Image (cartoon, grey):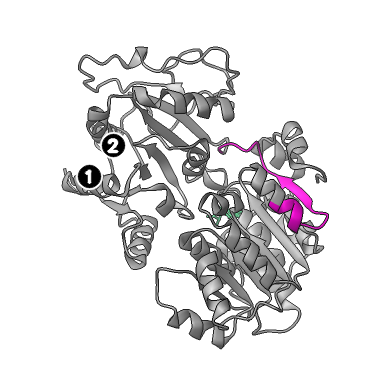
């Protein structure tokens, strides 16, 4: 366990998931959790704790403050939820004792669902508070009594201002995806929320990145915290990254060709704008793919239906914008395809965090035009990672020569995803099971097709 400044820890720690498991394997039973929680864990199908759970749970159980530097997909929600549920089993029911603040309603729903699932054999209640839907049901649920409130900042402040929620008895405050909350302009709201929870005994702070404003905030509100960091602040190691240079006007055809020719599971496609998400999803659906859009102009109900449909298999392809895709908790996303380059390195990390969740493998493909060269350089430099340049062998690029586009900048120190085994920009990882050029499912058609 690491005590100290996050940036010092960043320099020294670089856990490999498999090595970590070999040396530090523990089962959930070693945390001595209440048997009702162990039953909930069993029902979820978790057999062993993920690295962040192994590291964080004993300290959160001991009621230490925690700074968790981990991205979504590492199992961080259960890492804080299990000790929280263990605390709540003791002590009074039907008063708000835990407040969890998250940037988006999708993430709030996901955290709430984790509380419900893991706490299903207990009497503990969780409820959500977020904007974009009516207040009445939320007010009713609060009146009914809940020990855990999972909230987005704006609506929480509304309801607190209208005296529908009393936060004076909150014992544990969790700020999840703090960096994203700052990106979204919630920092002033967070400061207001902190004033509403003066009696808290424990604060847990999670962030995937540590820009200065986040470091200041965590320094201010955490009391002698234990720091837990999983991996570099970079995408999960189970994801293989590839860059597909392509002119803008060929992107759509390239996507169709790829989807036609490769074996995929669930595919999450990112576009830069809501409008592009809508049109691309419609074009895919017209071609017979089970595709749906997920963007901020949709009602909360439609967004939830899109996510639920993606989870259940009704849709194989979800075309999303960055904000709308925050907090999607769908296991087994085989491919993230950046149809448009993300605007920031952070957005790249968050998008890619949607695949390879909880140590599953996944592929991340990024389409890049010449205008994206600067962002490609930034991603490679900041994440110390080389995006393997690839072209799709059967695709008609016309006069465009993908092999000559976006050359690797030589003075960077790449951390190859294939362990440096191959020198070719176009080679595949050994053992790569899905989604690589030249490798087709039997019959050469995608399983994504409803009909051919
Ligand atoms: P999170 O990082 O909290 O968003 O979790 C990512 C995914 O990992 C979720 O689908 C969790 O249900 C799953 N998960 C969390 N803990 C475990 C575990 N110990 N074993 C297997 N899956 C897990």
Q: Quadrant of residue 14?
A: top right
Which residue is nearer to you in this view: 194 or 46? 194
The disc placed on residue 259 is 2
Q: Give the residue drawn at x 30%, y 57%.
A: 314
Asked whether residue 45 is in view, the answer is yes
Question: Which SS class for mark 2?
Answer: helix
Which residue is nearer to you in this view: 222 or 397? 222
Residue that numbered label 1 is attached to: 284
Are there few (<14), some (14-19), or many (20+) residues within 10 Å of tag 1? Answer: many
Question: Which SS class for mark 1?
Answer: helix
Q: Where is residue 19 shown, x and y percent of the image?
A: 70, 35
Distance from Cα at disc 2 to Cα at disc 1? 10 Å
Q: Give the residue drawn at x 45%, y 69%.
A: 131
Q: Tell me whether the residue at label 2 lies in contact with that at label 1, contact meaning CB atoms closer than 8 angstroms.
A: yes
Q: Is residue 146 above or below residue 354?
A: below
Q: Is residue 73 left or right of residue 433?
A: right
- Which range is magenta? 217-235
Q: Where is residue 247 shown, x and y percent of the image?
A: 28, 24
Q: Where is residue 106 shown, x and y percent of the image?
A: 46, 61
The disc placed on residue 220 is none
Foreground: disc 2 or disc 1: 1
Instruction: Tell me which numbered mark, 2 or 1, is placed earlier along the sequence.
Output: 2
Q: Give the residue drawn at x 80%, y 60%.
A: 64
Q: Is residue 150 above or below residue 20?
A: below
Is the CB atom of the residue marked by disc 1 within 8 angstroms of ligand 1's nearest atom?
Answer: no
* Quadrant location of the C terminus in the rendered image: top left
Q: Tell which quarter ligand 1 is in.
A: bottom right
């Amino acid at each position: 366990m690491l005590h100290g400044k996050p940036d010092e820890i960043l320099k020294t720690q670089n856990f490999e998931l498999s090595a970590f498991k070999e040396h530090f394997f523990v089962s959930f039973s070693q945390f001595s959790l209440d048997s009702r929680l162990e039953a909930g864990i069993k029902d979820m199908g978790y057999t062993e704790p993920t690295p962040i759970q192994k590291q964080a749970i004993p300290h959160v159980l001991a009621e230490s403050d925690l700074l968790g530097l981990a991205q979504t997909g590492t199992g961080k929600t259960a890492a804080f939820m299990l000790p929280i549920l263990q605390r709540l089993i003791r002590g009074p029911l039907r008063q708000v004792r835990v407040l969890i603040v998250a940037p988006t309603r999708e993430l709030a729903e996901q955290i709430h669902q984790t509380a419900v699932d893991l706490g299903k054999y207990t009497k503990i209640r969780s409820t959500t508070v977020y904007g974009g839907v009516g207040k009445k049901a939320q007010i009713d649920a609060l009146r009914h009594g809940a020990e855990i409130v999972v909230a987005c900042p704006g609506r929480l402040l509304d309801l607190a201002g209208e005296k529908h929620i009393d936060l004076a008895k909150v014992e544990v405050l969790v700020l999840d995806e703090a960096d994203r909350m700052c990106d979204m302009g919630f920092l002033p709201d967070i400061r207001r929320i902190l004033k509403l929870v003066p009696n808290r005994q424990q604060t847990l702070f999670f962030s995937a990145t540590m820009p200065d404003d986040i470091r200041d905030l965590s320094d201010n509100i955490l009391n002698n915290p234990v720091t837990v960091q999983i991996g570099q602040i970079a995408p999960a190691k189970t994801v293989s990254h590839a860059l597909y240079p392509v002119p803008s006007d060929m992107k759509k055809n390239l996507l169709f060709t790829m989807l036609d020719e490769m074996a995929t599971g669930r595919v999450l496609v990112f576009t830069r704008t809501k409008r592009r998400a809508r049109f691309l999803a419609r074009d895919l659906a017209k071609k017979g793919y089970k595709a749906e859009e997920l963007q901020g102009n949709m009602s909360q109900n439609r967004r939830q239906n899109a996510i639920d449909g993606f989870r259940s298999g009704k849709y194989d392809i979800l075309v999303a914008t960055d904000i709308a895709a925050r907090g999607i908790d769908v296991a087994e996303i085989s491919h993230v395809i950046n149809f448009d380059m993300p605007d920031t390195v952070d957005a790249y990390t968050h998008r890619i965090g949607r695949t390879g969740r909880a140590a599953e493998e996944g592929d991340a493909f990024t389409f890049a035009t010449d205008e994206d060269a600067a962002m490609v350089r930034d991603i490679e430099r900041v994440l110390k990672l080389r995006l393997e340049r690839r072209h799709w062998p059967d695709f008609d690029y016309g006069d465009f020569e993908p092999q000559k586009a976006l050359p690797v900048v030589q003075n960077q120190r790449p951390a190859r995803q294939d362990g440096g085994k191959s020198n070719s920009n176009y080679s595949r990882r050994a053992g790569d099971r899905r989604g690589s050029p030249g490798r087709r499912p039997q019959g050469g058609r995608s399983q994504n097709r409803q009909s051919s």
